Amino acid sequence: MDRVDVIAFGAHPDDVEIGCGGLLAKEAALGRRVGIVDLTRGEMGTNGTVEERKAEGEAAAKILGAVWRKNLEIPDRHIERSEENLAKVVEVLRLYRPTIILIPYWNDRHPDHVAASNLVTEAHFTSGLIKFLPELKPYRPKEMLYYFLNYEQEPSFVVNVTDYYDQKRQAIAAHDSQFGRRNPMLPTVVNTRFPYRLESRDRHLGARINAQYGEGFVVRNLLAIHDPVEFWK
């Protein structure tokens, strides 16, 4: 399998676009190999069919520059901690061996986002254990970066994504079944208030680092800065 530098995990086919689409587009533009993993097919969503959401996700991945997008087909609303689900995530980590992984923040209004955060966090640890799935060589990515969906917390750091924000907009718009204004589309939090709130959030985070748009991330470990002078040049 070809290695990637970054894997972004989402509970549903549009989560990574919302939380870290700008960073994914930026890393791809910098020559990094980016992969996207959706844990479910989003079949419990109010709008859109599984087939529509699959096609939309593939289109969005191309816009962001991802080299592949995979779906683990865990049942929507049942992202539970099980040996089967854990093995699915661990297998991805060991086959593609990313340097960092992007995960939904562990506090959110949607229970699936919380469950996805917990499952992938546990898989990150388990992936380094030699006795789990012994047929695959153990591997643990260097760091987990948690991205925001519904709830914004104080980030550990903010990435300037101004130059890539149009790609983020286009990738989100590719999920027309979720964010479009088609009839007979049923109104939801996602397709009414959320798009405006999302851009306001990213503008606010950008303003905090003197940029037009930013995406915030949380890390649980202390960041090591080897040369403060070089870092702040």
Image (cartoon, rainbow, N blue to C red):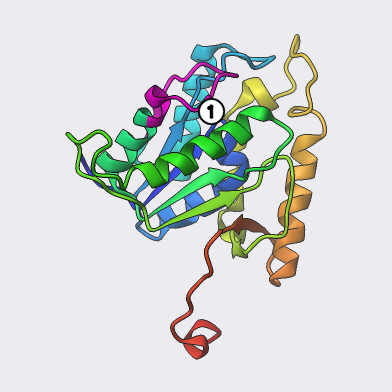
Residue 39 x, y percent position in the rendering:
48, 28
**Above or below: residue 108 compared with residue 182:** below
- Quarter of the figure that contains the N terminus: top left
Main secondary structure type of the part rendered in magenta: loop
Towards the viewer: 166 or 147: 147
Q: Residues within 10 Å of mark 1 (few under 14, many from 20)?
A: many
Estimate the x, y position of residue 230 in percent, counting from the top left.
Answer: 47, 87
Question: Which residue is labeled 1 in the image?
Answer: 13
Decide whether residue 73 is among the magenta residues.
Answer: yes
Q: Which residues are magenta?
A: 69-86
Q: Residue at x 69, y 71 (%)?
A: 209
Residue farthest to the front? 131
Vertical arrangement, residue 39 with respect to residue 220, above or below: above
Extreme residue toward the bottom, this view: 229
Q: Is residue 37 magenta?
A: no
Judge left or right: residue 227 versus residue 77: left
97 w.r.t. 191: above or below: below
**x%, y% of residue 50?**
52, 13
x and y percent of residue 149 in the render? 67, 41
Camera-side residue of 32 and 72: 72
